[in-house]
């Protein structure tokens, strides 16, 4: 993933989504800007926030226009911008409006993670600290950007852990952590952020950190810009010490209610509390992803009329181990000193690594299924309840060719995701979807990363599988998933595990749901295609309604 990100356009690598000037001005209208405060914009782009800040501060001062500009840039406005082109454009816009820039100002061309503004010496938690603190930090942190490879690991050590929780290694997450810690006590953040901040599990650590440091308010932006249709929010934060609640779109959510969710979700509300008052699906089933092959076309075949067309043969050979070869396949082209020494020793001893060669046949062979060299492969699709296998994977000798291909490939291919669950009975669903489209997974499948799965934990009764499939297909389950667990369209195996288990369903109703689900799966295996509007599923969904309420939506 990191390699792919480093091959993107410069704009995407930097995570740039420029804030429209009218939006920046509206955000600053909420701030109290007096002549004695310091404001930082840590990624100021072409000046959407910087220019209105200068207008406001210059209006607070006396003297000539040049004197007011110089004082504002020396005492009030600080900024960093990594993109040289945008940096120069911002300075040009300032000069067009205010006149020539003073020789001394605090607008820096550079990387926010590498730059510190010097301030007075003071004692911090780790000794003497001379980093400047700010009354207000505003802006739009880079979203989905790429870290400088030279300092990526250093940044992870500096910002990747807070309050005993992991902070996701994402540009906007690390930006927020650094910004919070550059605020004075009582200081304020006003940032435009991705709305993934609100619920996704990987941002749990950031949410916990923010609640531990101050008062959090978020509100959704009805629109951001034409550059992206991705939903955005305003993060309004005061560094005032641990808070007892979060305010989302004007409504308070207590930390006690938020704490009922494993992901510390800001999508939680009192209306969902009953659902989260018992066990989770993860107490009964383990979620798992599948494996990434790297070249599906070599090993995965679509099934057509009970047969496949096989265009390849496979043969194994031994390749000498060399340091140059291992560096080419390593993460970011880097290996530790110890790894280099081990590889040099292997190279000196003439050791080899097993590789597989893919040979194209002169004419594809038609193979009827089932066949001992192939296993069903759970490629993602939008079917629910059950889907007959529409792909198979070459799996001769327990997948020898696939596994050798992976282990001799790039660093990100070598792990075999989900391998302990291969060929087990369970359930699976479409990874990218607006709701949980689950279906029964018979025994015998090899698992694909694009279609996560769930499997019963040891000792859990077999019928729980059918009860949980029924639950995941209910409207209430989708509401909980998308409101509280993860509101994005990416449904990971951990999201599945964090779902509340429907403990409120009475035993007799639970038995009915299990029998109905078994009957529906049997019908689907005979060719019936179900949709969420199918009468059987509509009726089954009523089993899972929370007591005394038709809906628990906030």
Image (tube, rainbow, N blue to C red):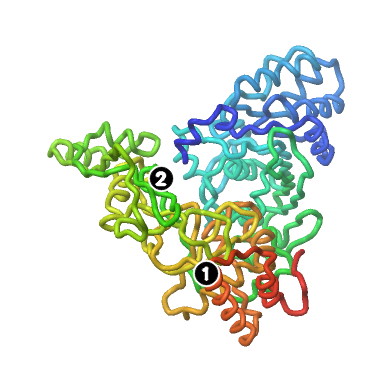
Q: Provide residue 133's location: percent of width, then percent of height.
A: 66, 38
- Kindly tell me whether residue 351 is visible in this rendering: yes
Numbered-mark total: 2
User: Disc 2 or 1, which lies upstream in sequence?
Assistant: 2
- Residue neighbourhood size for the residue with mark 1, other residues' Cα within 10 Å, grouped as few (<14), some (14–19), many (≥20): few
Up the image or down, 452 lies above or below 514; here it is: above
Label 1 secondary element: loop
What residue is pinned by disc 1? 526
> Image check: 177 left or right of 553?
left
- Kindly tell me whether residue 187 is visible in this rendering: no
Residue 296: give its label: 2
> In the displayed image of the protein, which residue is found farthest to the bottom?
508
Residue drawn at 64 percent across, 58 percent down: 435
> Image check: 428 left or right of 360?
right
Name the quadrant containing residue 396.
Answer: bottom left
Name the quadrant containing residue 510.
Answer: bottom right
Q: Provide residue 347's location: percent of width, then percent of height.
A: 17, 36
Label 2 secondary element: helix
> In the displayed image of the protein, which residue is found farthest to the left?
349
Residue drawn at 23 percent across, 43 percent down: 315
Kindly check if marks 2 and 1 are in contact, taking CB atoms under 8 A apart as contact. no
Q: Provide residue 123's location: percent of width, then percent of height.
A: 58, 44
Q: Kindly report the distance in space between the C-alpha atoms of the residues bearing marks 2 and 1.
A: 29 Å
Residue drawn at 73 percent across, 58 percent down: 246
Residue drawn at 75 percent across, 65 percent down: 553
Q: Provide residue 499's location: percent of width, then percent of height.
A: 59, 67
Question: 242 or 501: nearer the eye?
Answer: 501
- Residue neighbourhood size for the residue with mark 2, other residues' Cα within 10 Å, grouped as few (<14), some (14–19), many (≥20): few
Q: Quadrant of the C terminus?
A: bottom right
> Image check: 411 left or right of 258?
left
């Amino acid at each position: 993933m990191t390699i792919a990100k480093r091959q993107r356009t410069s704009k995407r690598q930097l995570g740039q989504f420029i804030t429209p000037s009218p939006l920046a001005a509206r955000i600053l209208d909420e701030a109290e800007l007096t002549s004695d405060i310091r404001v930082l914009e840590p990624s100021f782009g072409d000046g959407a926030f910087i220019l209105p800040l200068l207008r406001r501060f210059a209006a607070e001062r006396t003297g000539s226009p040049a004197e007011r500009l110089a004082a504002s840039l020396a005492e009030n406005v600080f900024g960093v911008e990594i993109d040289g082109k945008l940096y120069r454009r911002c300075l040009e816009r300032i000069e067009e409006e205010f006149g020539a820039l003073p020789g001394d100002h605090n607008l820096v061309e550079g990387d926010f993670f590498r730059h510190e503004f010097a301030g007075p010496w003071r004692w911090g938690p780790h000794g003497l600290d001379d980093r400047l603190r700010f009354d207000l930090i505003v802006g739009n942190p880079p979203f989905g950007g790429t870290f400088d490879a030279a300092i990526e690991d250093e940044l992870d050590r500096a910002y990747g852990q807070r309050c005993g929780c992991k902070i996701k290694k994402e540009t906007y997450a690390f930006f927020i952590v650094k910004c919070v810690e550059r605020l004075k006590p009582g200081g304020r953040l006003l940032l435009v952020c991705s709305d993934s901040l609100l619920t996704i599990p990987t941002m749990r650590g950031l949410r916990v950190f923010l609640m531990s440091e101050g008062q959090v308010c978020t509100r959704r932006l009805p629109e951001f810009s034409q550059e992206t249709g991705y939903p955005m929010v305003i993060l309004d934060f005061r560094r005032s010490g641990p808070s007892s609640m979060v305010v989302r779109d004007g409504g308070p959510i207590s930390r006690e209610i938020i704490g009922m969710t494993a992901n510390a979700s800001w999508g939680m509300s009192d209306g969902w509390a009953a659902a989260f008052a018992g066990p989770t699906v993860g107490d009964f089933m383990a979620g798992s992803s599948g494996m990434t092959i790297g070249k599906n076309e070599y090993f995965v075949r679509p099934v057509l009329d009970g047969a496949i067309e096989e265009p390849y043969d496979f043969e194994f050979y031994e390749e000498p181990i060399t340091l140059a070869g291992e560096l080419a396949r390593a993460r970011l082209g880097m290996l530790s000193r110890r790894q280099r020494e081990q590889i040099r020793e292997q190279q000196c001893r003439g050791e080899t690594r097993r590789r597989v060669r893919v040979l194209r046949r002169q004419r594809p062979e038609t193979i009827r299924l089932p066949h001992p060299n192939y296993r069903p492969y759970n490629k993602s699709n939008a079917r629910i309840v059950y889907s007959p296998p529409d792909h198979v994977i070459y799996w001769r000798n327990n997948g020898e060719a696939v596994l050798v291909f992976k282990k001799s490939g790039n660093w990100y291919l070598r792990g075999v995701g989900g391998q302990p669950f291969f060929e087990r009975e369970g359930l699976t669903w479409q990874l990218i979807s607006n709701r949980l489209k689950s279906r029964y997974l018979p025994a015998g499948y090899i698992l694909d990363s694009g279609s996560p799965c769930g499997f019963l934990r040891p000792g859990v009764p077999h019928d729980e599988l059918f009860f949980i499939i029924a639950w995941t297909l209910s409207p209430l389950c989708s509401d909980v998933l998308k409101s509280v667990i993860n509101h994005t369209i990416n449904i990971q195996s951990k999201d599945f595990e964090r779902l509340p288990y429907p403990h409120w369903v009475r035993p007799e109703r639970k038995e009915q749901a299990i029998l109905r689900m078994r009957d529906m799966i049997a019908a689907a295996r005979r060719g019936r295609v179900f949709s969420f509007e199918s009468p059987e599923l509509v009726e089954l969904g009523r089993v899972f309604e929370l007591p005394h309420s038709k809906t628990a939506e906030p």
